[in-house]
Image (spheres, coloured by chain):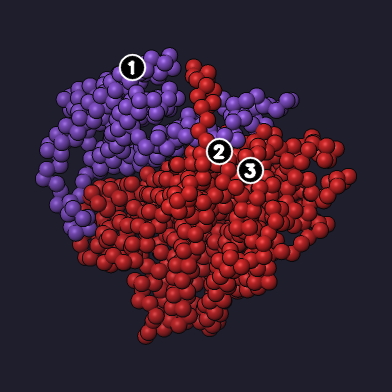
Chain colours: A purple, B red
Amino acid sequence: MSEAAATADTAAAHAPAASHGHAPAPGGNLWDGGVRPLGAHSKKFGMWLFIVSDSITFAALLFAYSYVRLSNVWPTPFHGHSIVTSTAMTFVLLSSSLTMVLAVDAANKKLRDKAVLWTMLTALGGLIFVVLHTMEWLGIINDHLMPLIKAGEETKSGWTMPMVWGTFFAATGMHMLHVTVGVGYLVVLALQYKNGKFKAIDIEVAGLYWHFVDLVWMFVFPLIYLMSAKI
Amino acid sequence: MSVAHDVEEEHEVHVHQEPKEFIWKYIFSTDHKVIGKQYFLLAIVAVVIGLGLSLAFRYHLATYTPQGMFLNPDHYLQAVTMHGTILVFMVLTTAPLGGFGNYFLPIQIGAVDMAFPRLNMLSFWLTLLSFLVLIAAFVVPGGPPVSGWTGYPPLSAINSATPGMGLGQTLWVGSIAIFCLASLVGAINFIVTTLDLRARGMSLMRMPLSTWAWFITAIIALLSFAVLFAGGLLLILDRELGTSFYIPAGVVFGAKELNHKGGSPLLYQHLFWFFGHPEVYIAILPGMGIVSHILANFARKPIFGYNAMVYAIAAIGVIGFFVWGHHMFQSGMSPYVAVAFSILTMTIGVPSAIKTFNWLGTLWKGNIEFTSAMLFALGFVSLFVSGGISGIFLGQNAVDIYFHDTYFVVAHFHLIMGVAAMFSIAAGTYYWFPKMFGRYMNEPLGKLHFWLTFVSVYSVFIPMHIMGLWGHPRRYAGFEYAFLNDPMIPSMHNMITAAAFVAVLAQLLFIFNYFWSMYKGAVAPENPWNGTSLEWITASPPAFDNFGGKEPVVNHGAYEYSVPGAEKDYIMQTDPPEAAPHAAAH
Ligand SMILES: [Cu+2]
């Protein structure tokens, strides 16, 4: 993804600031300037900040979900079949976290081909997740939302969506968007890492993103699916 | 596990040359200085539009009679909505942080650029896109929305409410969502830059207060825009896909009940104000930093209570996240919760007062030079006090219930958030212009600008406080003023409008001065104000890599003015440690 490309040459790498990474001034400590106090590459720190911010966005979405769920009578639409599908999706996504770990490890050991392979496998895991998820979405739309509830002219499409499906599509859609972006990010990363443009650190930074997206799913899955399962 | 690799990879040095072609040098530049100026220019265009709108509705209010009005009520609300949105997002958020922050934060910490120059360019272009999408609302069928800069649902969630609530409101939400992304990218860049790229010796407690303010502001932006983004997404879904997050059952529109149920407008208000209150600090904290920096410089004294200033900025940033409920006292809230929000709101008065007294302490027995920059900095302190005091009243839930929908609130937030922040922008411009363009701005024009603005803004907003006390409602395109039973009201409207015209015309003077001085101003040296911080060791304007290939090493705190025993009345941060015998301990 272009984000990684954009960070490929940070200002820290420019000539006069080469002192970054050297020892601090005599008698000084890590926070006295001239070094990165956190001991991590700036890109890694930047990704952590992105994760902080993005997790707040997801927290707000899940807060909204809880807010409307608590103030309404909530149906339990997920039968055994959809729980099986979503469990399979969860399994695929978690496995892709494992391949991501292996990719980072291989990159740090300078095993270039292996790192490319593991990164591509991670992307494949993400892709399978997106395909399964899309099929599930289409199934839900066919089962529950067709025909859609006809409404007045107040919505552009001329229909309204019951709250349970509004929250479902909002939360899982936002997550699916993150997975889709992540798949593109990993593919570009693997190709550019292969031809030497990206480094091991870039794989590690992508790994942070990928694990974060997996972690978000570990909140979405119980809150949206398991709590609404028909038992 | 990868630390060794980080170090190894960092030693691959890419030397970047300054691009030669116009388009890469000035348009698609990754240089933080060019990007800072781009943000600033964007803010100037936006402020002209935003202030122009305010003149339109001020003229309307002064000439209003039920028989004939300058704007019809729809247009009035559209003008107010766009005025608020443009000024809050495109001016007060972009100029102090995106403009000055981009230009001066890397220089003040001794870095050659931001940590991620290309992401920096991305955040500017996203901001510009957001601005263009917002402005497009003027030209689409139906025009801009009428729901105010806060965009409250259910109104904002219903496409057919008024003509502007169709495409216009859609563009508005889209613009805000893009703006959130731009701010997020920018905030990450500012935070990483401040922590990772400080020059040798630039410890955190040696950073200028302006840098501290930009740093804390970036943290606030990182945490608050994320919530607005989520709130905006749900509003888009309600509008476009027929969900009902914000629309309860039983909303009747056009004599027909809507088919939505289960949502809550309060949910939006919580998400919006969780962002909205910190947004006030996003607008004003950089101003506090800039003003502290300027006051010390022109009082020729160290800033009074530097550490307390840093802690106060941080405290304001933290407490600012726990007070959003004071915008919702009237929306229906448990009185117990309201009391909690009241108390937390008043807690913010403590760090704010610390800052104010420290500014006064800095001025005390100083050797004050009344430059235009200093006048605006002093004006900021004045506005901060007079605008902040009324905030204490409004933070009381019992008092707020009376004041909330009156001009009192309008006067309060315009003084503290709008005008005070504008004063800090003007102060920063007069102060840093010689550095940015190598020329001074015209001082007599600057002083005229100050006095005209200072007198006119108070003439606008003091009467509004009084009208608010009398119960004059806000957001009304007009009503029978006799209803308020006070014959003064129409003449006060006239006076406010006249003062508003003076205030806006004075800003044109400023904009003229800005562009005229770029080419015709007196040539400025490296350190025109005898300042101490790192921007004053660079050429005016600074070299492409800021320090001309040299690597600054910092030996002093940011505000060592009038140090006893020193040669000059200021010690620059890069002066050798022995320049002030007892200052090295800083
Ligand atoms: Cu507030």
Which class describes the residues within 10 Å of circle 1: few (<14), some (14-19), or many (20+)?
some
Q: Quadrant of residue A101?
A: top left
Measure the alpha-carbon separation of dots 3 and 1.
Answer: 42 Å
Look at the numbered disc 1 and give the secondary structure of its residue.
helix
Q: Is residue B170 above or below residue A199?
A: below
Rendered image: mark on residue B214: none
Q: Nearer the viewer, mark 2 or mark 3?
A: 3
Q: Position of residue B337 (x, y in %)?
A: 50, 46
Q: Are marks 2 and 1 in contact (CB under 8 Å)?
A: no
Q: Disc 3, ligand 1: is the CB inside 8 Å?
A: no
Give the residue drawn at x 22%, y 55%. Answer: A155
Rendered image: mark on residue B193: 2
Look at the numbered disc 2 and give the secondary structure of its residue.
helix
The residue where tag 3 is placed is B547
> Does the rendering let one see residue B332?
no
Chain under disc 2: B
Rendered image: mark on residue A113: 1
Chain under disc 3: B
Question: As shown in the figure, which amino acid type bears the numbered disc 2?
Answer: Thr
